Amino acid sequence: MKKILVQFFVVVGLVGCAFGPTTEELRLKVIGKSKTDLLTCMGTPSDSHFGGNVEYMAYSHFETKGKQIHKCDANFALTNDRVTQLDLVGGETGGSEVTSAFCKNLILRCFK
């Protein structure tokens, strides 16, 4: 009986990890974070520039596994040193599916 309960809780735990927050939920949680918080969790941006009073910071990450390429571009807009917008573009091998696990894992860095 103990063994069955342990197996049950392991499966429930794994299912919870697989689903967790959606990419959209994580995107919304990033809104309002400070520039310092963003730099701490994401590191140095691959590109940054100003447009008026808005600072734009871009992060491009990709990974190759065999013939498959996983890519995510995370583009942050900051006003008064706070994140006001996050656009995600990512997917696998040229796709544009913003819900890819790769983009989700990139944003999860800010919530560990």
Image (cartoon, grey):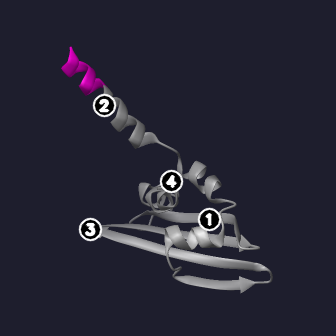
Stretch of the chain drawn in magenta: 1-8
Q: Is residue 50 above or below residue 11?
A: below
Q: Cβ–Cβ below 8 Å for labels 2 and 3? A: no
- First along the sequence among labels 2 and 3: 2
Give amino acid for label 1: Asp
Horizontally, residue 95 falls left or right of residue 52, namely left
At numbered mark 2, what does the secondary structure look like: helix, strand or loop?
A: helix
At label 3, counting other C-alpha atoms closer than 10 Å, the crowd grade (few under 14, some 14-19, many 20 or more) is few
Magenta: main secondary structure equals helix
Marks 3 and 1 sit apart, C-alpha to C-alpha, by 26 Å
Extreme-top residue of the structure:
1
Q: Which mark is residue 99?
A: 4
Query: Mark 3 or mark 1, which is nearer to you?
Result: 1
Residue type, mark 4 in image: Thr
Labels 4 & 2 near each other (Cβ < 8 A):
no
Q: Position of residue 103 (x, y in %)?
A: 47, 60
Pointer 4 or 1: first along the chain = 1
Q: Nearer the viewer, mark 2 or mark 3?
A: 2
Residue 6, percent across and down?
A: 25, 25
Q: Which residue is mark 2?
A: 11
Residue on which the image places disc 3: 67
**Horizontal relation, residue 58 to residue 1: left or right:** right
Q: Earlier in the sequence, mark 4 or mark 2?
A: 2
Give the distance between the C-alpha atoms of the residues marked 4 and 1, in whole angstroms: 12 Å
What whole-number distance in Å separates the C-alpha atoms at marks 4 and 3?
21 Å
Task: Check disc 3 and give the amino acid type.
Answer: Lys
Q: Circle 2: is it few (<14), some (14-19), or many (20+) Cα within 10 Å?
A: few
Residue at 71% x, 73% y: name it.
81
Q: Which residue is mark 1?
A: 87
Q: How many marks?
A: 4
